Image (tube, rainbow, N blue to C red):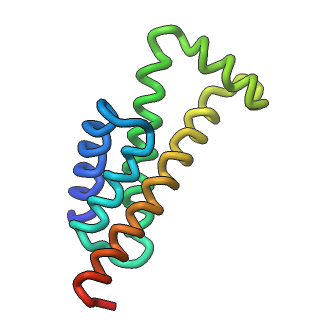
Amino acid sequence: MKTLINIILTVVIAFILSLFLPWWSVMIAGFTMGAIVGLKKASSFFVPFLAIALLWVVNAWFLAQPNDFTLTKKIAVLLQLEGNTFLLFLITGVVGGIAAGIAGVFGNQCKQLISGKK
């Protein structure tokens, strides 16, 4: 239950911040949730990773859908993905997820450093 709440809050914070800040705002969301909600070991990386990857894939799909994925297909051709929009969405999610996951681990480590826990 703690993980699900963390995912939802990370998505909400990242979405709100992305309205006003550049792409790196997902790192602020990951760091914040990592510092507030203390997750254990690998989940401190994978929970923000999953939340932001999901947010970016859904957001990319909603942005590409109105024009029938025309620009997305052209970008996929430029990146030598043979016009595969699904693969482009997957790469987009992974890039955002890695950024948020690293920030989540950093937030969790900062929380442990300040509280004195190992």
Quarter of the image for residue 107 reads bottom left
Residue lying farthest top? 67
- 54 and 105: which one is in front? 105
At which x and y percent is residue 30? 35, 56
- Residue that appears at 41% across and 69% down: 105
Residue 45 placement, left or right of 92: left
| Residue displayed at 55% across by 48% down | 94
Q: Tell me: residue 94, above or below residue 75.
A: below
Judge left or right: residue 110 versus residue 99: left
Q: Quadrant of residue 13?
A: top left
Instruction: Give the x, y percent position of residue 80.
Output: 78, 30
Q: Position of residue 51 (x, y in %)?
A: 37, 50
Q: Nearer the viewer, residue 29 or 60?
A: 29
Q: Is residue 82 above or below residue 28?
A: above
Q: Residue 74, image x and y in percent?
A: 68, 17
Query: What residue do we see at 65% from left, 19% from top?
Result: 73
Q: Quadrant of the N terminus?
A: bottom left
- Quarter of the image where the C terminus is located: bottom left
Residue ID at (60%, 15%): 71
